[in-house]
């Protein structure tokens, strides 16, 4: 801060009342409403302030008390989640969660949504989503080592959805590729429920030495606060409030100026500079200027440290002339950091930033009066007690009542759909062509998956694996959630998401360790949506407790609705796991002709919520597949034991498309397309045996000599297991039979369908992309 | 043997090159900063992959003006071995140390997966450890890898045995599907006239350990080591 | 010293394959615009420059184009130089 700035620190902060700035709108009920605050919330603002807020102050409150920053509709529910374990170093509340991975190393990881920005401008929305989550990781002191992406779109027969999908994939790719972080997996799901409301959740993992952990705290009275990185422009002003509102049909045009533009090159420099800065000891705290920019980063850093901050807006490096304090405070320009430096080290900080061709400017200092105070050329324009601002956001527990449409859909009798018997090859091949089942290679071929030369298992298998250089260890990660199950039964659906994530990890040979979650829901003010939110959190809490995978943080994205229609409740689970020996990493694909194929777990006559029903009968109905958490846990222990003993040639979770799809994926996903000959004895409806999505099942292959040991291990853990067939020759027959039905084709046909579907769908897009 | 790995702002494979050199042994890799003016007595230079200066304007266009590039140019002129990988190849073309240019992939999409390349010539310091027409499996990861040069230059490259690697099918054939980016003559890598400057789009440093899925890139480093040992002997 | 507005238009050289142009051509056709001929995609770079005369400004801009702003292997460029409206450069 310049010497001429009058300091207010000797004055009682409560008595500092900012005068209205010339040109600021008057605070009317309309202005309050436009800021997304209810009349009751505004009353609370006035109560906290003891007076009418200025326009600048109102902007600050509206950002901090939005759902995005304040979690006002989800906070009480989130407190139900298990967050602790001996290996958790940092739980929820920081930029990212951190766990101990041994050898003095710690892993930071988090998932975050960028749904609304991506709906408006898919490329920039997705790109800046990746940028934001990477900053969350490296502001903890960790070097990012992998990203994953969890995506949802409407069906691809719509040109708009193809445009959104292509733009998001390119945005995720271009940003991560440029920064040089490998993409190791994720998921994508298509369903008309996401028409108009695509979901873009990005997850990142980073590694650090334990002692390098740094927090987002502004402590030490008199320490300078510095703005670091890119300059501040008028990008995305009020993005945080915007991200918490429903999209209406005209939001496409009206919202355009709010879109932030990403600069991955600056991000890469910022990453290197930040890590150097953290290791230099010149700073006490650092935080990304993410949603709600300076406002949230400065007030949260003060809030965590129990201090205050005083910032001079005239000292913030800006990109455009004539920006008001309101605009500077709420700008969401990307690739910026807020740093609390040690007093007297300002020049050292600048020097490090300059090495990376970046700027660092002192814009204020840490105070001890507990106030968030903003000056413009020395004149106070905002003066707000910091704690009520960050922690005083009203939280709501709302009424939750299950929607009648869901009850009806769930009660639907599905008997008629179980009738088909005999040759089911045609529906099988159609199902393989569904973008929910077909290979996602079209997506991840656009992502750099091998940069950093540590990727052991690339996208396309059950979970991605990166080795930890210099040790035998490796880390696995996955994201999972089936929104259809969650719509039919949010509690069971959320359990299924946690169970599937854990299953994907054990199939890769990793011990499930911790969770980050992204709660994507509709408008929680509606009782049927709040019901979904509550039930999903309860299901998640139950499953995470039982699997000993605490939730270390995450993100909530509500109001995902278009014209009053909500997305499926989509509580995405990002889960990380550990491998003690990287050589235990197991892939999903058959490797040797003559190997035994086994299935673990129980197949029930369940087709509710299945991809088969959606694609073949255009129906989302029935009971979501049952989740037996205790059986799941036994299964996971069994599979992990087999992987650790080196008994498995492949292990693959059985999910969308059922057993038939899982066998197809294992057959063609590897280097060679290997035939499959499977004989099942089940007398259940063949539709359910082939395409039903019973949870808790894994398809394995092992050398013939290891079959008995695999079966013994399963028995020892109390897991139903059976040999069902044999891996065939390259290019051979693909045959699955039950006493009542059959699938008979060639593995080459399976391969063509599986890999050809998504490129064929997207080939149409290139001609339709808006220019 | 001392090997310089150049870091430009936006380089992101500099550590990968460093680790490959370290892991394979026989090299002492050292980073050189784009702002440095001297290479300080190294035996070889790597220009790593990444997005130098964000690839803004054109891939490699801004990096070529970095102070260190003067030193790299002098080193190359004096016959020192220089390897440009991916973005490094683009920088070498922009700097005029190699002919031609790398355009956007024909698909307009970033392409990242394992491809197969065929070793076309052993008469370079970078390929002597391979067998002629050996097929290597190595990752690519680029958006601008479509090699372009006019017919005269292409004829020269062909005539002078300067095409080092070509994209081929796993069986080693020049099939259209094997070309991931539309490169002229399936070109994946070339050398300059005096054969000491190599530019290639695939990433040999990502294929040097079994845990990464392929060790086919190790031969390039082995060749360079043998070359340097011969030169020093 | 006067200030000049320089517009640099960089285009792919004639005959060079331009996949972006091809994709846009295809898109325009499928949107139902008849008679669309060749589409070429280049870029426009705007900059301002202080110089003693228009000729000097042009000469320096031309050098910038040759050295950095275009790649002669693949691109051609055109220059437009105009005195900036109403703004005299300082110093």
Image (cartoon, rainbow, N blue to C red):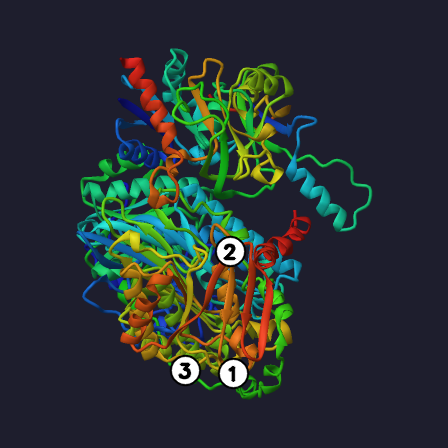
What chain letter is assigned to the residue under label 1?
A
The quadrant where residue B146 appears: top right
Nearer to me, A366 or B119: B119
In the rendered image, residues at marks 3 and 1 fall on the same chain: yes
Instruction: Determine the residue positioned at 36% across, 58% down.
Output: A477
The residue singled out by tag 1 in the image is: A683
Of labels 3 and 1, the one closer to you: 1
What chain letter is assigned to the residue under label 2?
A
Of labels 3 and 2, the one closer to you: 2
Work out whether residue A155 can be spotted.
Answer: yes
Nearer to me, A716 or A34: A716
Instruction: Determine the residue positioned at 50% across, 61% down.
Output: A665
The residue singled out by tag 2 in the image is: A729
Q: Position of residue A200 (x, y in %)?
A: 48, 59
Where is A600 relative to A198, above or below? Answer: below
Q: CA distance from mark 3 to mark 2?
A: 58 Å
Instruction: Determine the residue positioned at 45% across, 48% down.
Output: A323
Q: Position of residue A186 (x, y in %)?
A: 44, 58
Neighbour tally class for label 1: few under 14, some 14-19, many 20 plus, Cα within 10 Å: few
Q: Secondary structure at mark 2?
A: strand
């Amino acid at each position: 801060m310049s010497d001429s700035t009058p300091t207010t620190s000797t004055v009682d902060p409560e008595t500092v009342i900012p005068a209205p700035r010339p040109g600021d709108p008057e605070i009317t009920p309309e202005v309050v409403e436009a800021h997304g605050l209810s009349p009751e919330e505004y009353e609370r603002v006035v109560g906290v302030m003891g007076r009418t807020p200025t326009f600048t102050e109102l902007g600050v409150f509206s950002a901090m008390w939005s759902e995005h920053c304040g979690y006002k509709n989800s906070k009480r529910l989130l407190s139900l989640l298990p967050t602790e374990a001996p290996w958790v170093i940092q739980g929820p509340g920081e930029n990212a969660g951190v766990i101990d991975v041994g050898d003095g190393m710690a892993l930071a990881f988090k998932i975050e949504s960028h749904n609304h920005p991506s709906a408006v401008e898919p490329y920039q929305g997705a790109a800046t989503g990746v940028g934001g989550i990477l900053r969350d990781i490296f502001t903890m002191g960790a070097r990012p080592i992998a990203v994953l992406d969890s995506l949802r779109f409407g069906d691809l027969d719509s040109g708009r959805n193809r445009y959104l999908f292509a733009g998001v994939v390119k945005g995720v790719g271009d940003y991560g590729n440029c920064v040089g972080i490998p993409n190791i997996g994720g998921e994508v799901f298509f369903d008309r429920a996401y028409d108009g409301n695509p979901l873009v959740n990005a997850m990142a993992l980073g590694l650090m030495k334990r002692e390098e952990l740094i927090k987002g705290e502004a402590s030490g009275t008199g320490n300078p606060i510095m703005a670091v990185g890119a300059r501040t422009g008028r990008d995305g002003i009020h993005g945080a409030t915007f991200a918490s509102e429903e999209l209406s049909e005209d939001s496409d045009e009206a919202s355009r100026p709010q879109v932030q533009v990403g600069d991955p090159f600056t991000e890469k420099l910022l990453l290197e500079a930040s890590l150097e800065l953290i290791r230099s000891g010149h700073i006490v705290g650092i935080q990304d200027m993410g949603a709600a920019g300076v406002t949230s980063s400065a007030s949260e850093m003060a809030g965590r440290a129990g201090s205050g901050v005083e910032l001079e807006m005239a000292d913030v490096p800006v990109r455009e002339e004539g920006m008001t304090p309101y605009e500077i405070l709420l700008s969401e320009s990307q690739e910026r950091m807020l740093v609390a430096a040690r007093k007297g080290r300002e020049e050292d900080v600048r020097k490090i930033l300059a090495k990376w061709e970046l700027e660092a400017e002192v814009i204020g200092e840490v105070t001890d009066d507990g106030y968030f105070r903003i000056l413009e050329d020395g004149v106070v324009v905002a003066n707000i007690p910091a704690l009520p601002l960050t922690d005083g956001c009203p939280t709501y527990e709302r009424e939750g009542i299950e929607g009648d449409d869901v009850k009806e859909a769930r009660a639907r009798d599905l008997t008629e759909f179980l009738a088909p018997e005999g040759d089911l090859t045609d529906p099988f091949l159609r199902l393989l062509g569904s973008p929910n089942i077909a290979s996602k290679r079209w997506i991840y071929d656009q992502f750099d998956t091998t940069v950093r030369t540590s990727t052991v298992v690339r996208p396309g298998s059950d979970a991605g694996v990166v080795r930890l250089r210099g040790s035998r260890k490796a880390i696995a990660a996955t994201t999972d959630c089936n929104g259809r199950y969650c719509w039919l039964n949010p509690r069971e659906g959320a359990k299924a998401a946690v169970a599937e994530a854990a299953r994907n990890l054990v199939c890769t040979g990793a011990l499930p360790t911790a969770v980050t979650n992204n709660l994507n829901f509709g408008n929680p003010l509606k009782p049927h949506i709040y019901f979904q939110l509550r039930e999903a959190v309860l299901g998640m809490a139950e499953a995470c407790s039982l699997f000993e995978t605490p939730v270390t943080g995450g993100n909530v994205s509500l109001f995902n609705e278009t014209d009053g229609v909500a997305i499926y409740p989509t509580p995405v689970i990002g889960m990380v796991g550990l491998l003690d020996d990287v050589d235990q990493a197991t892939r999903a694909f058959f490797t040797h002709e003559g190997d035994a194929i086994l299935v673990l777990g129980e197949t029930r006559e369940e087709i509710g919520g299945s991809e088969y029903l959606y694609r073949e009968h255009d129906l989302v109905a029935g009971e979501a597949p049952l989740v037996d958490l205790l059986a799941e846990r036994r299964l996971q222990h069994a599979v992990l034991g087999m992987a650790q003993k080196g008994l498995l040639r492949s292990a693959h979770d059985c999910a969308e498309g059922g057993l038939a799809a899982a066998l197809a994926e294992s057959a063609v996903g590897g280097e060679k397309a290997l035939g499959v000959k499977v004989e099942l004895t089940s007398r259940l409806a063949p539709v359910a045996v082939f395409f039903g999505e019973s949870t808790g099942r894994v398809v394995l292959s092992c050398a013939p000599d290891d079959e008995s040991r695999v079966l013994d291990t399963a028995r020892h853990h109390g897991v139903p297991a059976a040999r069902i067939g044999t891996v065939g020759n390259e290019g051979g027959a693909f045959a699955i039979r039950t006493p009542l039905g059959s699938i008979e084709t060639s593995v080459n046909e399976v391969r063509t369908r599986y890999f050809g579907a998504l490129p064929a769908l997207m080939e149409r897009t290139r001609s339709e992309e808006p220019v | 043997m001392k090997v310089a790995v150049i870091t430009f702002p936006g380089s992101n494979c500099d550590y990968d090159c460093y680790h490959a050199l370290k892991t394979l042994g026989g090299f002492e890799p050292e980073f050189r900063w784009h702002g440095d003016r001297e290479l300080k007595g190294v035996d070889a230079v790597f220009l790593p992959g990444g997005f130098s200066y964000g690839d803004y304007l054109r891939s490699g266009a801004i990096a070529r003006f970095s102070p260190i590039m003067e030193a790299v140019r002098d080193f190359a002129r004096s016959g020192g071995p220089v390897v440009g990988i991916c973005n490094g190849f683009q920088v070498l073309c922009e700097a005029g140390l190699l002919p031609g240019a790398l355009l956007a992939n024909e698909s307009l999409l970033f392409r990242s997966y394992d491809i197969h390349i065929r070793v076309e010539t052993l008469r370079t310091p970078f390929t002597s450890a391979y067998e002629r027409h050996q097929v290597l499996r190595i990752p690519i990861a680029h958006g601008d890898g479509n090699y372009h040069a006019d017919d005269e230059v292409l004829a020269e490259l062909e005539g002078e045995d300067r095409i080092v690697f070509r994209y081929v099918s796993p069986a080693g054939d020049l099939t259209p599907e094997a070309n991931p980016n539309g490169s002229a003559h399936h070109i994946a890598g070339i050398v300059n006239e005096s054969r000491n400057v190599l530019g290639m789009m695939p990433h040999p440093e990502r294929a040097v350990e079994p845990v990464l899925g392929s060790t086919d890139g190790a031969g390039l480093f082995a060749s360079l080591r043998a070359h340097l040992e011969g030169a020093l002997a | 010293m006067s200030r000049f507005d320089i517009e640099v238009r960089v285009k792919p050289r004639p005959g060079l394959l331009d996949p972006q142009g091809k994709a846009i051509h295809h898109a325009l056709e499928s949107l139902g615009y008849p008679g669309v001929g060749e589409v070429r995609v280049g870029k426009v770079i705007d900059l301002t420059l202080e110089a003693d005369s228009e000729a000097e400004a042009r000469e320096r801009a031309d050098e910038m184009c040759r050295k950095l702003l275009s790649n002669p292997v693949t691109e051609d460029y055109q220059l437009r130089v105009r005195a900036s409206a109403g703004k005299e450069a300082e110093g």
